[in-house]
Image (cartoon, rainbow, N blue to C red):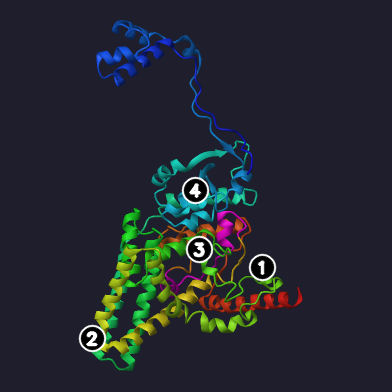
Amino acid sequence: MGTRAARSGGPHRGAENPARKRLAVGARQQTHSCSPRTQSTRLTGPAEPAADVARLAMAPDPVAAETPVQGPTPRYFTWDEVAQRSGCEERWLVIDRKVYNISEFTRRHPGGSRVISHYAGQDATDPFVAFHINKGLVKKYMNSLLIGELSPEQPSFEPTKNKELTDEFRELRATVERMGLMKANHVFFLLYLLHILLLDGAAWLTLWIFGTSFLPFLLCAVLLSAVQVQAGWLQHDFGHLSVFSTSKWNHLLHHFVIGHLKGAPASWWNHLHFQHHAKPNCFRKDPDINMHPFFFALGKILSVELGKQKKKYMPYNHQHKYFFLIGPPALMPLYFQWYVFYFVIQRKKWVDLAWMITFYIRFFLTYVPLLGLKAFLGLFFIVRFLESNWFVWVSQMNHIPMHIDHDRNMDWVSTQLQATCNVHKSAFNDWFSGHLNFQIEHHLFPTMPRHNYHKVAPLVQSLCAKHGIEYQSKPLLSAFADIVRSLKESGQLWLDAYLHQ
């Protein structure tokens, strides 16, 4: 435990005014007396006339007048002291040079305990700004967590962070807000929801009009998989609070889209996805790379580290081959499908469970009368299979080929840029990926409405060019191929370290 730079002090007390002392006695007399008889036995001196009391109360206290009244002396801390509070027992973080003790608050944090804990012992100013749409309200609730501030001689950033880059990014964010790019076009999202509902209706009409033979059945499955994926992109918008100006409406629509249209819990998505945004591609902090090391060896650094430790949970040098078996086809139907129920029951998320049940009731009542139970189960599995392939390729193309490492406590911009890349803009790419082809902009501004990503992209590119940061954008198919290439490369690095280091 480090030594604090300065201790806290209480308010300064001057010499006590005798008149005020007698007034205090009189106040106690009025408060505690039950009768005149009881009063006379409790007082140590005779009662003073009311006029004398008033005169004494108005008399100035010469000692108190000369002594200035001071507030509590602020407690000052160093970055080393903050960094030491990053464990399980005590957790501090810094926002705008203010030091907060979040040790007990983590369990009550609306965004989840882990996402805020990932910044324990670090400056969290930029992620705080990035994730909250009503920062003034949130800061009011944070006052009870405030324990002090950084010492005046302490810099505003840790040594691991690029001050110039951070300052310019904050200026860029201010410019973006002035341009109105953080405000959503509600018509865009309404039309997007309507197009999902139309696809959903078209899937059912296909079977009702054309029958349940193979081709209508397959077309229905393709349409339903598009519904599931596109609803996944839309719930992502509501989950990031990027549609409405208040959290209440975003949360409500989030429950509807992910719960009723997809059959998944909002709390599960929040728990995983906010961690990913807070520390993308950081081992043990980003749950999206939890398949390392039990299924895949990811990233150059972690793969070599695994090889040197002589650990082999899978034949990683062949992972670029078995990825096609246990990656895209299996994630949804064999893992997510059952795990979401375990999640809500284990954490007692009954509201989420109720929303999920409405999806399964609706799906069952819609298709069992047309198909029968056996064909219905087959349709459901095929939809999840197609959805899984679509989702995995899109969600991994922006991250798996990028830098993967332990958390190095880098600045917000560097953390996001080294872990993300873009896919070229086109009408199809935008629709196919839910505008997550602009992954860089999305990670820098997670509450920005997706229809504004392309507008802020040139500003982000200029910032990257000025500071020598690589801004990667590639064709869609090249992005897919890079997933396989990076898996092959990291698998070979593991093998070389395993055999020779």
Residue 210 as seen in the image, left or right of residue 303? left
**Residue marked by disc 3:** 276
Q: Which residue is mark 2?
A: 369
What kind of element bears circle 4? loop
Q: For the residues marked 1 and 3, what is the alpha-carbon distance in whole angstroms?
A: 19 Å
- Assess whether residue 424 is covered by the magenta stretch: yes
**Residue farthest toward the right in the current orientation of the protein:** 500
Residue drawn at 30 percent across, 68 percent down? 355
Q: Say what secondary structure mark 1 lies in.
A: helix
Q: What amino acid is labelled 3 in the image?
A: His
Instruction: Judge left or right: residue 236 versus residue 212.
Output: right
Q: Are marks 4 and 3 in contact (CB under 8 Å)?
A: no
- Amino acid type at circle 2 is Pro
Give the class, few, some or many, for how many residues have Cα within 10 Å of label 4's Cα (few <14, many ≥20). many
Q: Earlier in the sequence, mark 4 or mark 1?
A: 4
Q: Give the label, 2 or 4, closer to the camera.
A: 4
Label 1 sits on what residue type? Answer: Ile
Q: Secondary structure at mark 3?
A: helix
Circles 1 and 2: CB distance less than 8 Å? no
The quadrant of the image that shows the C terminus is bottom right
Which label was assigned to residue 102? 4
Name the image quarter holding residue 187.
Answer: bottom left
- Say which quarter of the image contains residue 48: top left
